Image (cartoon, grey):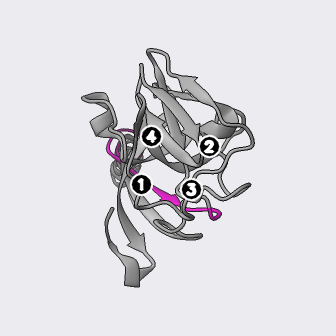
Amino acid sequence: MDRESIKSWLITIAVAFVLALFIRNFIFNTSNVKGPSMEATLHQNDHVISLVFPLFFRDPEPGQIVIIQSPFENKRYVKRLIGLPGDTIQILNGRVYVNEKEIDEPYIQGKETLVENENTWTLGPDDYFVMGDNRLPGESMDSRAFGPVGKKAIKGIVVFRYFPFNKVGKL
């Protein structure tokens, strides 16, 4: 190969690399579900696609499944968004209330949301409350344990499961 061909290949590889980084950071991302925290909606080793770009234009909505950055370690979690900035979240007698209204949660694993102490959280102007769908004790590390997360901790909105193949589909 001559010098021009090598230069052309290097430029092509560099452009492809930059484009891949752009897509991964600003358009969509893929994640692998680890652990039982989102059962029965998602299971261990399910692979999902999350959209990043909608977060630049609008806030996520309650009920959406989101990818969050863990507030205390270099990990990402898949969780369901429960509360928005300004909301008051209360867990009382195994039920979740947002602004004093019980929310319908047909997706949760188990019949109730269990906590060691019944708690109330009032969310600040940048706070979001997230929980796993598996509300059994010790099955989900979420806002019940580490408190609300800031908007910058939300890394994507999960929209599609692409593996396992027998469960492929929109979420």
Question: Which numbered disc flags the more N-terminal residue, 1 or 3?
Answer: 1
Q: Residue at x 43, y 33 (%)?
A: 98
Question: Between marks 2 and 1, how big is the CA–CA gap?
Answer: 16 Å
Q: Which residues are magenta?
A: 23-36
Question: Which mark is on residue 105?
Answer: 1
**SS of the residue under disc 2:** loop
Circle nearer the viewer, 2 or 4: 4
State the residue in front, 91 or 75. 91
Question: Which numbered disc flags the more N-terminal residue, 2 or 1?
Answer: 1
Q: Residue at x 46, y 37 (%)?
A: 97
Residue 140 percent location from the top left of the image: 65, 53
Residue under pointer 4 = 82
Amino acid, disc 4: Ile
Q: Residue at x 52, y 40 (%)?
A: 130
Please tell me in which quadrant of the rendered image residue 168 appears.
bottom left
Residue under pointer 2 = 142
Against 18, residue 13 (above or below) is: below
